[in-house]
Amino acid sequence: MRKEAGFTLIELIMVIVILAVLAVTALPKFFNLKTDAEASALAGVAGSLSAASSINYAARSLSTANGTAIGSCQAVANALVEGALPSGYSISTLTLTISDGSTKSCKLTGPNGTAHFTAIKTS
């Protein structure tokens, strides 16, 4: 008599149960990407404001005809290429009462949080 090889019903059910448990633990990671994307967007805007402030400071150091005078945190947005923040973002209106070339931390508020960026004062 020949013995047939194959999986039993219990083995197949156990594999399905293990796959279901793995799927239940992994799926929430994929569904919660919106908050991660919004936090990354906020960090990206804050990084671009810091970079714009640094580039503007370098341009103003060469000649005051270049770049934009930055005396407040809000004025850093004017140093951006487009000259405006994306919709839904705002900057604190802290005046930079520091000497030229000094840095100050400014607060950026986005749709779902806040981030900080560095402003460099120029006159």
Image: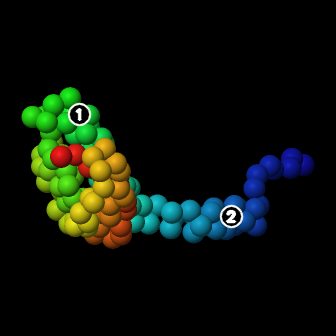
Amino acid type assigned to the residue bearing label 2 in the image = Ile
Decide: is 122 above or below 89. above
Residue type of the residue flagged with mark 1: Ser
Reading the image, the residue beneath label 2 is 18
Q: Quick check: can you spot residue 38?
A: no
Q: Quadrant of residue 25?
A: bottom right
Mark 1 or 2 closer to N-term? 2
Query: Quick one: 123 or 2, which is closer to the camera?
Result: 123
| Nearest to the observer: residue 85 or residue 69 | 69
Residue at image x 44%, y 66%? 32
How far apart are labels 1 and 2 at the CA level?
Answer: 64 Å
Element class at badge 2: helix
Indicate left or right for 44 with 62 as reference.
Answer: right
Q: Residues within 10 Å of mark 1 (few under 14, many from 20)?
A: some
Residue pictured at 21% horizontal, 58% vertical: 72
Measuring 32% from the left and 60% from the top, which residue is drawn there? 106
